[in-house]
Amino acid sequence: MTADRITVGELQELLAGGWPVTVLDVRPPSDVDWEIPGAIHIDAYADLQSGRLGPLAELSLAQGPVVTVCGVGRTAAIATELLRANGVETLTLDGGMRSWSLAWNSAQTTICGCEVIQVRRTGKGCLSYIVESDSETVVIDASVEPKVYVRLIRERGWRLVAVADTHIHADHFSRSRRLAHLESAALLLPAQDRAQYPFRPVADGDRIAFGSSALVAMRTPGHTDESTTYVIDNTAAITGDTLFLNSVGRPDLEGGRQERASRARLLYTSVSRLLQLPEATQVFPGHVSEAIPFDGRMLGTTVGTIRDSVALTRLDSGEFVEAVLARIPPSPPNHSRIVEFNQRGELPEDPSELEAGANRCAVA
Ligand SMILES: [Fe+2]
């Protein structure tokens, strides 16, 4: 922390530790597609650009420092300077929301004797998983810096044996290849011919053994052709972008427009197959569509809850396809460039430049 700046890592630690802090987001409302949990939004952008506090002058602040945030940190720095001149303890979030895209937090639970840590990119909604049995672990859908997983695994005395992806991602760079390389672990991807680097292909029904447990692969195409769900002991399903907490994956990001309907039909079959799992089966998706709180609570639901509450899942095949195609959201920014990197197994020097912003892998 310098005199008037705070890094993403430092703010993440304050929020994770429950310290009092007021996050003041000064972006114009039209730029707000994602936020920091608990942030207060005050549209002072135009005033700040003219060197005035505007509505921020009226602010009554709770205890703790104020952390100002904007897109990349420039306008927030003006707010910080003006607030500090008024005697308010204020810090600017270095790099703004673009850098916040890499912030993360975690939650942990036990499933059939396996420890499961959900590692969440709070600034983007991506969920990844460390699954442990007898001190051996598998990481699924690594989406934050590899050193984060290495630290979480090593500080518990565990060992990484495999890294697996549910599909070739379009909204973030997969860190799986780098993580597997760092720890000399196996790299597993659903069988397909798009990835241009060595990996162990996973087919429907394959068992990925670790400790005294195993993940069973269930091919669930639709969101992408290769999309695969990993099932732990018929008790929990890590569903990637096939099935979310209250929606399903979008079927349109790969292939042409005319393929959308056939992919949506595949998605219907895959979702129906997942919903045939026992109703108490926990569902842990690859994304959520809101900023993830620093509350340590797992984000998940059950097959039974989805059957009862997600209207899309009660439609027949024709209705499902029609409803999904009618609700396709705008394509995620930069998705084709991100896919190219993921197919080559590469990471750009500054991932946040292409990754920043909300994920859009779900049909609302
Ligand atoms: Fe996806």
Image: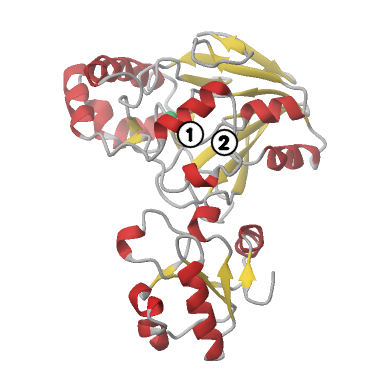
Disc 1 C-beta below 8 A from ligand 1: yes
At mark 2, the secondary structure is: strand
What amino acid is at disc 2?
Ser
Q: Which residue corresponds to mark 2?
A: 128
Residue at the location (37% across, 80% down)?
50
Question: Which residue has dot 1 on it?
Answer: 286
Which of the 4 image quarters holds residue 109? top right
In terms of image quadrants, where is residue 144? top right
In this view of the protein, can residue 236 be seen by the observer?
Answer: no
Q: Is residue 43 left or right of residue 77?
A: left
Please tell me which residue is depicted at 37% across the width and 23% down the height of the picture.
Answer: 223
Can residue 230 be seen in this snapshot? Answer: yes
| Pointer 1 with pointer 2, Cβ within 8 A | yes
Is residue 143 or residue 236 the one in the foreground? Answer: 143
- Label 2: few (<14), some or many (≥20) within 10 Å? many
- Callout 1 amino acid: Gly
> In the image, residue 238 lies at what x, y percent?
51, 28
In the visual, does 360 lie left or right of 114? left
Crowd tier of the residue under label 1, counting other residues whose Cα lies within 10 Å: few below 14, some 14–19, many 20 or above: many
Asked if the beta carbon under badge 2 is closer than 8 A to the nearest atom of ligand 1, the reply is no
